[in-house]
């Protein structure tokens, strides 16, 4: 049966597509997809669209189907090729991420995709690597090396290196229930309410919500993550004070790890935290596994408007239960050996015996 797909764009989607066309900074196939969607939204037939855009009728049908069955992003993007193998192995992807997070080559202000592709050719057995492969792998890890705000590693001195290796060595230890390693961090969350009731999704149309919203204040998340077992705990508090932090640490000891002899906590040294933090500066947050977990929490659970603390606690608790039940883990691949190999020039120089 030949299904007829109807494209019904929201005003937000129309604005996005028109901005994309006016910029002219995208691949021609993406621009044509935008033209197809706008024309279909205006009521043009498939044959008319195919003639005006200069594509085949099957292309018009496919783009409309991807929009209706998926979303705008899916309609504009290339579909993955069936059975296509990833160019980089898991270890090579970890090496790429570590390289992108390290200092750029001398004489360059920042990494570019071509520079990273060249560096990977030197570091691996690949004879060539396209900048598009590099871009895709970095995008999956949330990295944009051409932006200054993505740099993970600050100016490094001897003390920084020593503390960094302490953390990496902790991650590499064999699990010991009597001496668990727990990553800790906190993150503010703004409570956002709807100014108008959203229109529910229906076949052929995405859910619609208004641009306007209400700010209902902020709350704080204290997030704990066990390095060696699939467990995390998120505590929602109304503030971020030393007293709240102390209660969180007390629960860690009395409730979550009552049988532990000692708990090693990886955390930063914000003023609300104790002086026993395992590394010095907030710039070292990239070393804290829980930063990745907070990113997962925001992407899977908090990427929407939640208007009150009660609902926020309920939604986070549901996310936490499912993630723990699924035994989800953070796959940490940046080791002490890799740090020394990739950041060798950042280590303090030592005198050589004659």
Image (tube, rainbow, N blue to C red):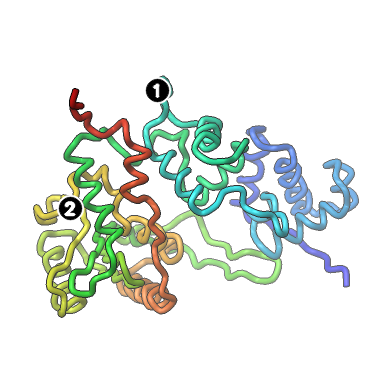
- Quadrant (top left, top right, bottom left, bottom right) of the N terminus: bottom right
Residue 85 placement (x, y as % from top left): 66, 54
Where is the C terminus found, in terms of image quarters?
top left
Q: Indicate left or right for 125 with 221 as reference.
A: right
Q: Is residue 227 among what the camera can see?
A: yes
Q: Which one is in front, 338 or 193?
A: 338
Q: Where is residue 184 in the image (x, y as percent from the top left)?
A: 24, 61
Q: Position of residue 186 (x, y in %)?
A: 25, 58
Near mark 1 (Cα within 10 A), the count class, few <14, some 14-19 or many ≥20, is few
Q: Residue 106 carries which label?
A: 1
Mark 2 = which residue?
Answer: 278
* Residue in view at x 47 percent, y 33 percent: 146
SS of the residue under disc 1: loop
Of 64 and 118, nearer the camera is 118
Q: What element carries label 2?
A: loop
Q: Residue at x 47, y 40 (%)?
A: 144
């Amino acid at each position: 049966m030949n299904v007829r797909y109807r494209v019904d764009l929201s005003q937000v989607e129309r604005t996005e597509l028109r901005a994309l066309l006016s910029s002219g900074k995208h691949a021609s196939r993406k621009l044509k997809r935008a033209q197809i969607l706008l024309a279909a939204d205006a009521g043009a037939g498939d044959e008319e669209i195919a003639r005006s855009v200069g594509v085949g009728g099957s292309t018009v049908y496919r783009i409309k189907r991807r929009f209706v069955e998926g979303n705008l992003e899916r309609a504009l993007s290339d579909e993955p090729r069936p059975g296509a193998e990833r160019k980089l192995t898991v270890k090579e992807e970890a090496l790429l991420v570590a390289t992108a997070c390290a200092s750029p080559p001398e004489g360059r202000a920042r990494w570019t995709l071509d520079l990273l592709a060249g560096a990977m050719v030197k570091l691996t057995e690949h004879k060539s690597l396209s900048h598009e492969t590099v871009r895709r792998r970095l995008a999956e890890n949330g990295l944009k090396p051409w932006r200054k705000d993505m740099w993970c590693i600050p100016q490094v001195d001897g003390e920084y290196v020593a503390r960094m290796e302490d953390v990496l060595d902790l991650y590499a230890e064999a699990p010991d229930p009597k001496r668990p390693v727990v990553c800790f961090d906190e993150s503010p969350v703004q409570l956002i309410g709807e100014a108008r009731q959203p229109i529910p999704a229906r076949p052929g149309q995405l859910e619609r919500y208004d641009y306007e919203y209400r700010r209902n204040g902020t709350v704080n998340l204290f997030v704990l993550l066990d390095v060696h077992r699939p467990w995390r705990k998120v505590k929602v508090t109304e503030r971020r004070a030393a007293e709240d932090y102390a209660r969180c640490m007390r629960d860690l000891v009395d409730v979550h790890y009552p049988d532990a002899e000692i708990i090693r906590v990886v955390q930063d040294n914000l003023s609300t935290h104790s002086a026993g933090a395992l590394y010095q500066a907030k710039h070292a947050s990239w070393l804290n596994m829980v930063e990745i977990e907070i990113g997962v929490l925001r992407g899977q659970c908090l990427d929407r408007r939640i208007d009150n603390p009660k609902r926020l606690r309920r939604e986070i608790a549901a996310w936490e239960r499912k993630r723990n039940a699924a035994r989800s883990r953070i796959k940490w691949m940046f080791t002490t050996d890799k740090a020394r190999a990739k950041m060798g020039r950042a280590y303090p120089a030592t005198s050589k015996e004659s």
